[in-house]
Every structure is written in C-alpha cells, then in structure tokens.
Image (spheres, grey):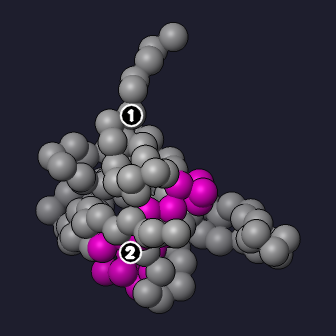
Amino acid sequence: MAVTYIHVTVSNPEKPERKEAFKFLVDSGTVYTVMPEGVLGSLGLGPTSTEDFILANGESFTMPVGNAYFEYKGKTRAAPVVFGSPDIFLLGATTLEALGMILDPIHRDLKPLPMSLM
C-alpha cells in the first residue's frame, strides 16, 4: 500500500510569526495530528490537557495535547496536536477535516472535502 506525505506549515496561535514547515505522513486513521514534543516547544507551544489513546495492539497510554495552526495550500486552521516522540510527524483526520481536505484512499492524494452545513 502506498503512503502519502505532504508539507504543512505549523504555527503558534498566540504568536503566528513562530512557524515552520514540516513533512507529514498523512494518517486518516489517526484522530489527532502528532508531532515531536521538542519541535512543538521550539514553536512556543505547550500542552493544554492530556488525552487517553489506544494503539492498534490494544495498548493504552496518556499523552499531552495542545493546539496549533496548520497551513496547507493557503488555508490556515486550528486543530489539536499531540506532543509525541522525536521524528514522529503524523497528520491526523481532525487536522485534515479542519483544512477541508480528505484522503482519497485509491489515488493516495488529498482532495477537497465536500462541506455541508446541515
């Protein structure tokens, strides 16, 4: 199965000038986006809460979660981000939806998400 990577700019909602672009693996099976704790700290971001997570093997654990701005193709949206391990850059479903995008599982690329209000 093919994988999909995209470049997304991440910034601090309180100081939007603190931003940097990163290469993310798109993982539509992951709810929240995951980034290294040290990278988020360098952007001046800190956790606002913790959340319980479950891995595919059934293992559960608690991780810190904060909020960041994500910019892709000229659109910037806020979404939760998990403070994860070094070298882990996963773009989750919540961020994809916030950006108005959906992963096409056949062609492995992003497409606009049809938006409905009702």
* Vertical order, 38 against 77 (above or below): below
Of 27 and 85, the residue lying toward us:
27
Of 111 and 13, the residue lying toward us:
111
* Vertical order, 7 against 86 (above or below): above
Q: Which residue lies at the image location 43% right of the left edge and 75% below the top edge?
A: 89
Q: Which residue lies at the image location 39% right of the left edge and 53% below the top edge?
A: 107
Image disc number at residue 27:
none
Question: Mark 1 belongs to which amino acid?
Answer: Leu
Q: Which residue is mark 2?
A: 40
Q: Is residue 49 left or right of residue 36?
A: right
Instruction: Look at the image and give the residue range highlighted in magenta.
Output: 23-45
Q: Which residue lies at the image location 20% right of the left edge and 57% below the top edge?
A: 16
Q: Which residue is mark 1?
A: 113
- Does the stretch in magenta take in 88? no
Percent of width and height locating residue 75:
21, 43
Question: Mark 2 belongs to which amino acid?
Answer: Leu
Which image quarter: residue 62?
A: bottom right
Q: In front: mark 2 or mark 1?
A: 1
The answer to whether residue 15 is visible is no
Cα distance, mark 2 to mark 1? 27 Å
Which image quarter: residue 50?
A: bottom right
Q: Is residue 12 left or right of residue 82?
A: left
